């Protein structure tokens, strides 16, 4: 899991993003799709390419 590799817990990472822990958990478990703004923040915070994390259909 990338969050763990980068030293984040879900709670800490959701605070960094400015989202709730529940919303981040839903994104991680594929129950919700992040908004473009949140998806961009996730990629930036993890220092990964957007397209390595998300599939655009």
Image: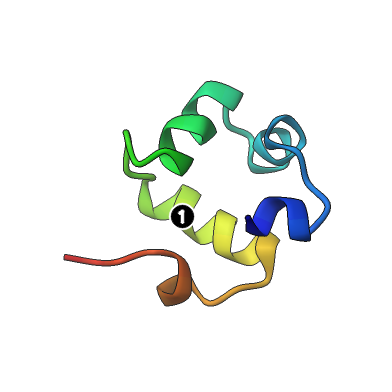
- Image quadrant for the C terminus? bottom left
Q: Is 53 left, or right, of 12 in this rendering?
A: left
Going by the picture, which residue comes out furthest to the right?
7
Q: Residue at x 60, y 25 (%)?
A: 21
Q: Which image quadrant: the N terminus? A: bottom right
Q: Where is mark 1, residue-wise?
A: 39
- Residue 3 rendering spot, x and y as whole percentages: 69, 52
Taking the spot 68% from the left edge, 71% from the top edge, the residue there is 47
Rendering coords of residue 51 (x, y %) = 41, 75
Crowding at mark 1 (Cα within 10 Å: few <14, some 14-19, many 20+): some
Residue 31 in the figure: left or right of residue 7: left
The answer to which image quadrant residue 10 occupies is top right
Residue 18 lies, in percent from the top left, at 64, 35
For the point 72% across and 42% down, which residue is it? 16
As displayed, is residue 46 above or below residue 47?
A: above
Q: Secondary structure at mark 1?
A: helix
Please tell me how many numbered marks the rendered image carries: 1
Q: Is residue 12 left or right of residue 14?
A: right
Residue 19 to residue 36: above or below: above
Residue in the picture at 52% in, 22% down:
22
Give the image location of residue 43, x and y in percent: 56, 64
Please state which of residues 45 and 26 is positioned toward the viewer in this rendering.
26
In the picture, residue 34 is in which quadrant? Answer: top left
């Amino acid at each position: 899991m990338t969050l763990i590799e980068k030293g984040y817990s879900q709670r800490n990472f959701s605070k960094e993003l400015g989202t709730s822990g529940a919303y981040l958990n839903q994104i991680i478990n594929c129950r919700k799709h992040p908004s473009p703004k949140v998806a961009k923040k996730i990629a930036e915070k993890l220092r990964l390419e957007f397209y390595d994390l998300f599939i655009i259909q």
